[in-house]
Image (cartoon, helix red, strand yellow):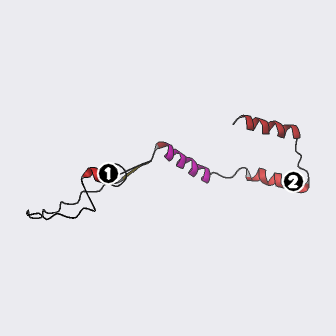
Amino acid sequence: MKIQGPGYGNEAPRAERGSKPDAPEQASSAPPAKPAAPAARTDAVEISAAALEIDRLLESAKASPDVRATVVERLRQEIRSGNYQVHDRTLATRIVEEYLSR
């Protein structure tokens, strides 16, 4: 994401612009100049394609039905009733495979 505009790092530092905020004003014999019209400020935000894709995927995930809810509920019932069986070797193999894939 890029943020562009006045005050967002794309201006020259104050010292380079010639402005000295703490310097006292010097008396001048010339008449005061009319203040310049304020420059139009234009700020812009640019969102990357990757950020837009992430947003689209998140919205899609939020809108999709939770198809695993029935699987989770079935497993909860099996655990509560004492019928859920853990296969030790299968569990150990999957843990090792998951660890090694990182």
Residue at 82% x, 51% y: name it. Answer: 75
Tell me which segment is drawn in magenta.
50-63
- Mark 2 neighbour class, 10 Å CA radius: few under 14, some 14 to 19, many 20 or more: few
Q: How many marks?
A: 2
In terms of depth relative to the viewer, which is nearer, 77 or 46? 46
Left or right relative to 23: residue 68: right
**Quarter of the image where one finds residue 33:** bottom left
Instruction: Name which residue lies at 88% across and 57% down.
Output: 80
Label 2 – label 1 distance at C-alpha: 66 Å
Labels 2 and 1: the sequence-earlier one: 1
Q: Residue at x 57, y 47 (%)?
A: 57
Q: Is residue 4 left or right of residue 21?
A: right
Q: Single out the mark in the foreground, 2 or 1.
A: 1
Kind of residue at disc 1: Pro
Q: Position of residue 54 (x, y in %)?
A: 54, 46
Q: Provide the major secondary structure of the magenta segment.
A: helix
Q: Secondary structure at mark 2?
A: helix
Crowd rating for badge 1 (residues with CA inside 10 Å; few <14, some 14–19, many 20+): few
Extreme residue toward the right, this view: 82
Q: Nearer the viewer, residue 47 or 82?
A: 47
Q: Which residue is mark 1?
A: 13
In this rendering, the answer to whether 57 lies above or below 40 is above
Magenta stretch encompasses residue 21:
no
Secondary structure under tag 1 reads loop
Q: Which mark is residue 79?
A: 2
User: Which residue type carries mark 2?
Assistant: Ile
Q: Percent x, y for residue 85?
A: 89, 46
Where residue 37 appears, as percent x and y from the top left, is: 19, 60
Q: Nearer the viewer, residue 55 or 37?
A: 37
